[in-house]
Image (tube, rainbow, N blue to C red):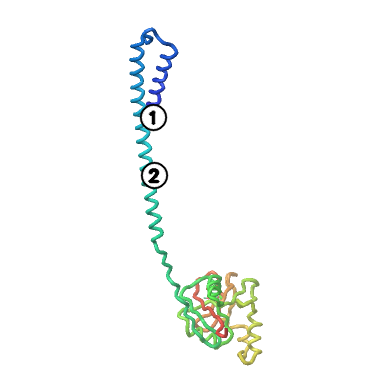
């Protein structure tokens, strides 16, 4: 449409030019020339108005479109402002006290590393067994067949360390030598492994679990197992 109107105007201008620069005898007749110019002028004005209207309509239409878009965005914004982000208040973890520690028994089963992180995030650590009494307490509380211990030999095969960095045997030997807390017997020093464990079966077992039967096994760390977090009750 624009193109048609523009080409019509170009034709009209060229008519004007013709009249100005190459006047014919006919249009040089004053009355005829005046009539032609008046005719052309009114045609030009009419077409110009048409073009003007057309452009106005186009602008109005795009203005309306923009206004519509703006009010839609406004509504969206108010809806977003009104939308209350209600974050559920996290339920406090249930800690159970025994001896000098608090214990949290997980409701989910996780990979060992994730369990370790979750305990750390709750200002605690994956359980470290310091005595048979402690182990008995944990075992009678758990509903699952096994839970992760904070014990692994990921760094050096057959060198079992608790999550506090202490070596299993040295840790337990220290308890054994500290007669107030320790319990007698080689088993207390080397741990409560199930017969034949830890065996690093398939060469992929670096994390320890405690079984309901009160003994330990090494299994792959990427198994999903429930876990127990421990923290001191003394501070
Ligand atoms: O699930 C891995 C687990 O498989 C066996 O126990 C069911 C192995 N036991 C023996 O080989 C005796 C475990 O060592 C192993 O961790
Ligand atoms: Ca094993």
Dividing the image into 4 quarters, which one contains the C terminus? bottom right
Q: Quick one: label 2, few (<14), some, or many (20+) residues within 10 Å?
A: few
Q: Secondary structure at mark 1?
A: helix
Q: Residue at x 52, y 87 (%)?
A: 98
- Mark 1 and mark 2 lie on one chain; the one further toward the N terminus is 1
Q: Is residue 78 above or below residue 190?
A: above
Q: Disc 1, ligand 1: is the CB inside 8 Å?
A: no
Q: Which residue is mark 2?
A: 66
Vertical comparison of 44 with 165: above or below: above
Which of 216 and 30 lies nearest the eye of the viewer? 30
Give x and y (percent) for residue 169. 65, 82
For the residues labelled 1 and 2, say whether their Cβ atoms are less than 8 Å apart.
no
> Is 130 above or below relative to 52?
below
Q: Position of residue 17 (x, y in %)?
A: 43, 16
Please identify the residue farthest to the top as the structure is shown.
25
Quadrant in the picture for the N terminus: top left
Q: Position of residue 188 (x, y in %)?
A: 61, 86
Quarter of the rendering containing residue 15: top left
Which dot marks residue 44? none
Classed neighbour count for the residue bearing mark 1: other residues with Cα under 10 Å, few (<14), some (14–19), many (≥20)? few
Q: Secondary structure at mark 2?
A: helix
Compared with residue 110, is residue 63 higher up or lower down, i.e. above or below? above
Q: Quadrant of residue 31?
A: top left
Q: Ligand 1 sits in which quadrant?
A: bottom right
Give the left or right position of residue 23, taking residue 233 as reference. left
Q: Which mark is residue 2?
A: 1
Q: Position of residue 183 (x, y in %)?
A: 60, 90
Q: CA distance from mark 1 to mark 2?
A: 22 Å
Residue nearer the viewer, 107 or 20:
20
- Residue with the most extreme front position: 30
The front one of 161 and 189 is 161
């Amino acid at each position: 449409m624009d193109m048609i109107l523009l080409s019509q105007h170009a034709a009209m201008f060229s008519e004007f030019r013709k009249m100005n620069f190459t006047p014919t005898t006919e249009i040089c007749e004053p009355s005829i020339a005046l009539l032609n110019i008046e005719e052309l002028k009114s045609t030009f004005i009419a077409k110009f108005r048409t073009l003007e209207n057309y452009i106005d309509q186009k602008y109005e239409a795009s203005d309306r479109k923009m206004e519509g878009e703006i009010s839609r965005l406004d509504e969206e914004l108010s809806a977003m402002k009104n939308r209350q982000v209600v974050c559920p208040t996290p339920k406090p973890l249930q800690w159970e006290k025994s001896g000098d520690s608090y214990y949290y028994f997980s409701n989910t089963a996780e990979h060992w590393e994730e369990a370790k992180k979750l305990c750390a995030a709750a200002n605690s650590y994956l359980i470290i067994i310091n005595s048979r009494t402690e182990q008995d307490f944990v075992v009678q509380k758990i509903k699952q067949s096994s839970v992760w211990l904070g014990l692994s030999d990921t760094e050096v095969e057959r060198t079992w360390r608790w999550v506090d960095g202490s070596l299993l045997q040295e840790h337990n030997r220290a308890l054994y030598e500290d007669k107030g807390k320790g319990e007698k017997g080689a088993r207390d020093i080397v741990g409560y492994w199930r017969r034949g464990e830890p065996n690093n079966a398939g060469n992929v077992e670096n994390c320890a679990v405690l079984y309901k039967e009160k003994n330990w096994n090494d299994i792959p760390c990427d198994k999903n197992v429930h876990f127990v977090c421990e923290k001191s009750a003394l501070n």
